[in-house]
Image (spheres, grey):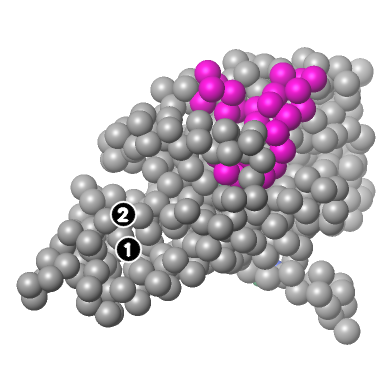
Amino acid sequence: MSSLALDLTEEQALIRDTAREVARAEFAPRALKADETGTFPTENVRKMAELGLLGIPVPQEYGGAGAGVLAFALAMEEIASVCASTALTLAAHTSLGTMPIIDFGSEEQKRKYVPRLAAGEILGSYGLTEPGAGSDAGGTQTKARREGEGYVVDGAKCFCTNASYAGTTIVTAKTDLTAQGSRGISAFILEKGMPGFTVGKKEDKLGMRASDTVQLRFEGVKVPAGQLLGKENEGFHYFMKTLDSGRIGIGALALGIAQGALDKATAYAKQRKAFGKPISQLQAVANMIADMVVDVEASRHLIYQAARLKEEGRPYGREASIGKLFASEAAMRVTDKAIQILGGYGYMQEYEVERYYRDAKLCEIGEGTSEIQRIVIARETLGRTGS
Ligand SMILES: Cc1cc2nc3c(=O)[nH]c(=O)nc-3n(C[C@H](O)[C@H](O)[C@H](O)COP(=O)(O)OP(=O)(O)OC[C@H]3O[C@@H](n4cnc5c(N)ncnc54)[C@H](O)[C@@H]3O)c2cc1C
């Protein structure tokens, strides 16, 4: 057990254990098939809802557990260690689909949506990325023009996690066409079934294959003014804050994938024999295991530290970026070594570590690529001008 586990509160340990139990007993046996067929883990989502895992950091007054971001990260880690697609579904629902309403929404919006999201009655999603605007999300082309009491939204989004199954999708749109760069963007809460709001093609992906990734289209979607999230033209600021926090979740996702791959490689190395003894007794293999442990433990320290800073109300954006960057790249190294330790079997679907390797890659891309994390970290260290 990691020494960090000793510092957990009773509530955090309980949430971790709950997630661990259901992940190992129910999600793990379904993960291989779900990846192979690209089937959304509906049953896992239902189970997470039943156990209260869809509202971990949501304040109790809005129906959540009020258990904070570290407890959320712990649950993410456990679920990702057996089924990263389910963990990504949970991350998008919580960090992107629910928390922005808590952080920036009106009291009415919070009462209307958050208890249903926390209970898993509806799933949340978040559409920021567009075909022409990913890292450069300030380049949003989706537009919302004022009409009567509300807005009319036109445009498209891509790579939106959960959106086919979501009851609400928070989307960004340009509301002030005269504003330069990232200014003049607003966020809106769209509901499933709003006329003109359609979910497009489901993407076929390298990894995270059971998670839902889709395109969205908005054609003259009439959005009542009450669906504006926070203030008009403040959307860019909101999603930057949302991503800061979301990166703790993606870091925990990477950490869980790495831990899962390490566990599988360790178990295999102890039972696989070559040259008359278990391969774990070969120094080259033992060294790989040692390097994997160091990567996993270092990731865990960084992610927990960022989560703790956030819970203490201290600045945490830099630490979240550091944790996400390190854990994502560490997950690639660890899953690569896991395949190597399993040899030819590691290359086979049935032994699962090849899935961990494919799933890990997403962590270097989603919620800000590794290149963007380096920009954030350098900027925090050197200042905006670098001088
Ligand atoms: C499975 C999956 C799920 C996703 N889920 C969601 C979701 O739910 N909601 C959502 O809004 N988005 C989602 N995304 C989108 C994701 O956040 C973007 O793909 C990511 O931000 C990168 O944007 P892009 O794909 O347009 O790449 P680009 O921004 O075009 O980047 C291409 C390359 O250029 C590099 N680059 C770009 N700008 C710079 C720079 N300034 N300096 C150095 N290098 C740079 C990038 O790091 C990258 O290597 C998802 C993506 C995937 C793959």
Query: Which secondary structure lies at badge 2?
Result: helix
Q: Give the range drawn in magenta.
A: 48-75
Q: Does the segment drawn in magenta span residue 91?
A: no
Instruction: Name which residue type carries label 1.
Output: Ala
Instruction: Name which residue type carries label 2.
Output: Lys
Q: Does the segment drawn in magenta span residue 72?
A: yes
Residue that badge 2 annotates: 264
Q: Give x and y (percent) for residue 107.
A: 88, 21
Q: In this view, does 103 lie above or below 322?
A: above
Left or right: 16 with respect to 352? right
Q: Which residue is drawn at 39% across and 43% down?
A: 82
Q: Nearer the viewer, residue 265 or 241?
A: 265
Q: Nearer the viewer, residue 102 or 155?
A: 102
Q: Nearer the viewer, residue 300 or 145?
A: 300
Residue that badge 1 annotates: 338
Query: How many numbered marks does the figure carry?
Result: 2
Q: Nearer the viewer, residue 376 or 262?
A: 262
Q: Is residue 51 above or below residue 279?
A: above
Q: Give x and y (percent) for residue 187.
A: 80, 36
Quadrant holding the C terminus: bottom right
Ligand 1: image quarter: bottom right
Left or right: 158 with respect to 66? left
Residue 97 appears in the figure = no
How busy is the neighbourhood of tag 2: few (under 14 within 10 Å), some, or many (20 plus)? some
Chief secondary structure of the magenta span? helix
Q: Give x and y (percent) for residue 159.
A: 55, 43
Q: Give x and y (percent) for residue 65.
A: 68, 26
Query: Which secondary structure lies at badge 1?
Result: helix
Check if mark 1's residue and mark 2's residue have beta carbons within 8 Å. Answer: yes
Q: Which residue is drawn at 12% across and 66% down?
A: 273
